[in-house]
Image (tube, rainbow, N blue to C red):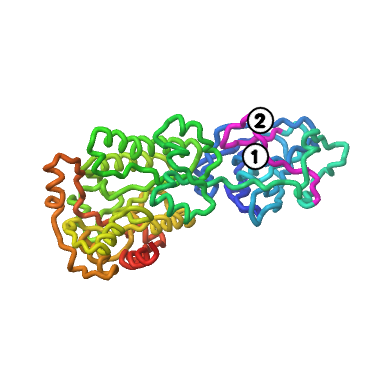
Amino acid sequence: MTDLRVDETPIPGLLVVHLPVHGDARGWFKENWQRAKMTALGLPDFGPVQNNMSFNATRGATRGIHTEPWDKFVSVATGKVFGAWVDMREGDSFGATFSIEIDESVAVFVPRGVGNSYQALADGTVYSYLVNDHWRPGFAYPALHLGDETAAIDWPIPLDSPEVEISDKDRANPRLSEVTPMAAKKTLILGGNGQLGRALAAAFPGAEVATRAELDVTSPEALAAWPWQEYAVVLNAAAYTAVDLAETPEGRCDAWAANATAPAALARIATEHRLTLVHVSSDYVFDGVSTGSTSEDGHTEDEPFTPLGVYGQSKAAGDIAVATTPRHYVLRTSWVIGEGKNFVLTMRSLAEKGVSPAVVDDQVGRLTFTSTIADAVRHLLDSGAPYGTYNVTNSGEPMSWRQIAAEVFSLSGRSGDEVTGTSTEAYFADAIAAGKPISPRPLNSVLSLAKLEATGFTPADQLEELRRYLSVV
């Protein structure tokens, strides 16, 4: 009896699993699929939803080469087969082949897009396979001729032997030169017309971008109709960000719909379709005065939520919902600056107009440029960083809004001293007196970057990025 072992093959992602088989005079027993043990050895936790079996009455029955759009875990319940696989995916490994004999002690994990075939080597062979998607009638997928000269599979029983039985359909499969490679699953960017959505589109040029007009994440009907099986990653930049209007009856409803209910729906979809969900959150989930804000490094990812207003409450609820799906990244940001109306451009406009503004000086944090967020998303996905929540801002010494405004003035040819300071309470006094909706602000929005930096990503200094940003906008 061998130990449980997982071996790699020349086809990326195609894994051979050697199974311990316990036998005696009665027969044998094996753990054909053992999630905990196998994933610990590197097998993907692929979430099978259907178990199929194929009975092959006589030696020589040959099936394939079929390239289904789902992962498979193949084995035999009885008998023996010669298994052969051809990589039919786009990329450098297209056309790569691998083969091995499978008896009760061997199983093979076959990733989506790798063509699967086998030849029965004994009468009464039962071939079994677990798959992680349900078969759908009428769905077409690539296939390859069993005798393709390029693949050159060395079948133990020659295909022209009278022992070999092949279906008419498989005999009509095309050669490799006629096959259209299977495309990889796509990345979807939600909220594509916002500041962050545009930055993500630049960082992920091959991604599909959906605006609210194309996919309203607050609409259950729209979400249900979307072809989620075509995607591997969803980047959620859709959000309600009007923090003051969120304090109105209508705004409260809209904020909760976009920031809490929609992420919860996306989390359920991500779980069902085994997607990686990336969601962007906010420093507003903290009040800026509790334990985390007094630490030297700022709020940490595991600090308890203490939101002050409706916007922060709805974002905190969204964070909790997204964390329920296994493959998730929540990126918590502060003071976001990108393409479109924002604080930095407003200050530059005032500087150019000769205005000397009063800016709040009791709120402290760091700027987060949308390009930095997009780069952090790319890094987390490409590096395979552990799923979870990460703070993402630019680095550097924390500053107040007044200090940032003064820096913008200096970079715009005005003296930073022309920006005066005021308190948050005084700044909003007139609006509050007039009965206008105002959301409470966290006074300390500094987020610790230690967890992000431990993955190998160090954000650029906020002042360096500010200078770069003002030089190109």
Query: Which residue is label 1 attached to?
Result: 68
Amino acid tagged 2: Gly
Of the two numbered discs 1 and 2 in the rendering, the one whose residue sits closer to the viewer: 2
Q: Is residue 240 left or right of residue 121?
A: left
Q: Which mark is residue 138?
A: 2
Observer-nearest residue: 136 or 58?
Answer: 136
Q: Which residue corresponds to the image point at 30% horizontal and 49% vertical from the top-left?
A: 282
Q: Tell me residue 132's x, y (percent).
A: 56, 37
Q: Is residue 364 visible?
A: yes
Upstream in sequence: badge 1 or badge 2: 1
Write down the quadrant of residue 407 in the picture: bottom left
Q: Which residue corresponds to the image point at 37% horizontal and 48% vertical from the top-left?
A: 280
Q: Alpha-carbon distance for marks 1 and 2?
A: 13 Å
Q: Is residue 297 left or right of residue 81?
A: left
- At numbered mark 2, what does the secondary structure look like: helix, strand or loop? loop
Q: Quadrant of the N terminus?
A: top right
Observer-nearest residue: 434 or 305?
Answer: 434
Q: Is residue 356 left or right of residue 78?
A: left
Q: Is residue 426 above or below residue 223?
A: below
Q: Tell me residue 331's x, y (percent).
A: 36, 51
Q: Which residue corresponds to the image point at 66% horizontal and 30% vertical from the top-left?
A: 138
Asked whether 336 falls inside the magenta stretch, the response is: no
Q: Is residue 374 left or right of residue 114?
A: left
Q: Which residues are magenta?
A: 126-149
Amino acid tagged 1: Glu
Instruction: Judge the density around disc 1: few (<14), some (14-19), many (≥20) Cα neighbours within 10 Å.
Output: many
